Image (cartoon, rainbow, N blue to C red):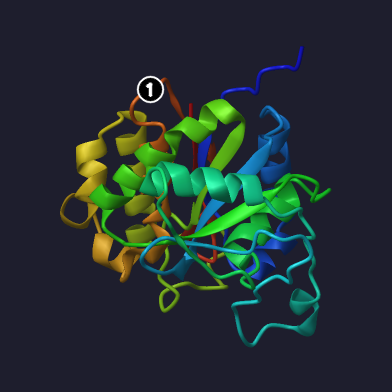
Amino acid sequence: MSQQPSRMPTLYLSHGAPPLADDALWTRELADWSGGLARPKAILVVSAHWEDAPLTIGATADGVPLTYDFWGFPQRYYGVTYPAPGAPALAERVRELVTGPGGALHQEADRGLDHGAYVPLKEMYPEADIPVLQVSMPTLDPARLLSLGRRLAPLREEGVLIVGSGFTTHNLREMSPRAHGRAPSWSTEFDDWVNRAVADHDVDALVDFGHKAPAATIAHPRSDHFAPLFVALGAALDDHRSSLSTVDGFWHGLAKRSFQFD
């Protein structure tokens, strides 16, 4: 008799720019995090770096090149590989959940994983032997992303790890390589507020973060890196048991905080 898949949590992780993979603390935290999870049958990623409406499915074939969606970095960052298997069965299941029987979704068959997906996954699952599917983020509206997460929630019972990949604070104009662990007040205040709101499961406050969180417009001049939180949160909303802050601290002044929703 085949073993039933484990019910998977959902994750919101702060993925950082490619150089964050050079941070030994962050890479160890991600490896420890994945080491404490049941092994997923497949991974579904929504990244801040792919906005496209309606929801669009990325590559499902094996061997599709990564999407190096960044500029001006040393050449070694463009040589990173992550040859995870494609996930055509998961793509079909996503289509069923999002559109219903007989529905259709857009697909970009040649779009490989972007750095919001492969940078953290390379640290969490370095063997690249778990099928991965990336789908676009079709909106920045928190309520609509919660709804999307809720539609995807059945995947958890099928052994699929749903990952929203962003950054808890994200203002590239204000980041500072000279921060040396001392983050600016706008970043620490927003980070602390989010951590408390998640711990309290205050979904209404999180959805209205633009009005309720301190320094929200500085922490997120544009909400693309906070928006993936709502997909992960939505997928755990109807049977929420616990929330865990798994990673904290700052990188160049930006909050690395990440969450696990069980």
Q: Is residue 195 visible?
A: no
Q: Is residue 151 above or below residue 18?
A: above
Q: Is residue 13 above or below residue 17?
A: above
Of all residues shown, which one is farthest toward the right? 127
Residue at image location 61% in from the left, 69% down from the top: 109
Residue at image location 63% in from the left, 45% down from the top: 89
Q: Is residue 160 visible?
A: yes
The N terminus lies in quadrant = top right
211 or 250: nearer the viewer = 211
Q: Position of residue 246 (x, y in %)?
A: 55, 37
91 or 138: nearer the viewer = 91
Q: Position of residue 197 (x, y in %)?
A: 30, 37
Q: Position of residue 31 (x, y in %)?
A: 73, 42
Horizontally, residue 20 falls left or right of residue 148, namely: right
Residue at image location 55% in from the left, 52% down from the top: 45
Q: Is residue 192 above or below residue 58?
A: above
Neighbor class of circle 1 (other Cα within 10 Å; few <14, some 14-19, many 20+) is few
Residue at image location 45% in from the left, 75% down from the top: 172
29 or 149: nearer the viewer = 149
Horizontally, residue 187 falls left or right of residue 250, namely: left
193 or 157: nearer the viewer = 157
Q: Is residue 105 above or below residue 148?
A: below
Horizontally, residue 146 falls left or right of residue 89, namely: left
The number of discs equals 1
Query: Which residue matches tag 1?
Result: 239
Q: What amino acid is labelled 1 in the image? A: Asp
